[in-house]
Amino acid sequence: MRRHLSLFLALVTLALTSAPTTRAHDAAPGIVRQLLTSEVLPNVPGHSLTALKLVLPPGAIAAPHRHEAFVFVYLLEGQVRSQLNEEPPMDYVTGESWVEAPNALHTLTQNLSETKAATLLVVFVAQEGATLTTSGAIDQ
């Protein structure tokens, strides 16, 4: 299992150096998303996998949002506080990860450092055509 994880992380690192970079349309200023891949999953009919790199500048706090997907997040670098729905906030450091159920309200995503960016690998597994990220008002 460790060997597979090491290979996966090596491939992600390679992809991070060559993928195009875009600013998130619904994110706080300075938050950048970099699409790594988007592929149909042949063994899961009607579903796709999308992976991206997300960079949160120092002190950044993303707006509350939802994903119409199962989400796996791996913190490549930095310190992040994350809160889902009404659960207590959790702090994560480099090398830690979490998952999000489809349509969970991500109430807080915060870079805890005031001096260094935080970099996250975000992997979505969703039905084809799903909206991966939508703003999510607290009353929804």
Image: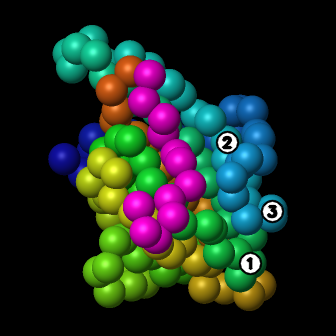
Residue type, mark 2 in image? Gln
Looking at the picture, how far across and down is residue 57, in whole percent? 74, 70
Neighbourhood count class around disc 3 (C-alpha, 10 Å): few under 14, some 14–19, many 20 upward: some
The answer to which quarter of the image holds residue 74 is bottom left
Residue at the spot 35% in from the left edge and 41% down from the top edge? 69
Q: Is residue 54 left or right of residue 92?
A: right
Please give the residue where the numbered disc 2 appears in the rendered image: 34
- Say which of 78 and 83 sits in front: 83
- Say which of 7 and 72 sits in front: 72
Query: Measured along the vertical axis of the image, is residue 30 above or below residue 116?
Result: above
Q: Between tags 3 and 1, which lies in front?
A: 3
Please give the residue where the numbered disc 3 appears in the rendered image: 30
Residue at the spot 76% in from the left edge and 40% down from the top edge? 21
- Main SS of residues in magenta: loop
Residue at the spot 33% in from the left edge and 59% down from the top edge? 104
Looking at the picture, how far across and down is residue 1, in whole percent? 19, 47
Neighbourhood count class around disc 2 (C-alpha, 10 Å): few under 14, some 14–19, many 20 upward: many
Earlier sequence position, callout 1 versus callout 2: 2
Please give the residue where the numbered disc 1 appears in the rendered image: 58
Residue type, mark 1 in image? Pro
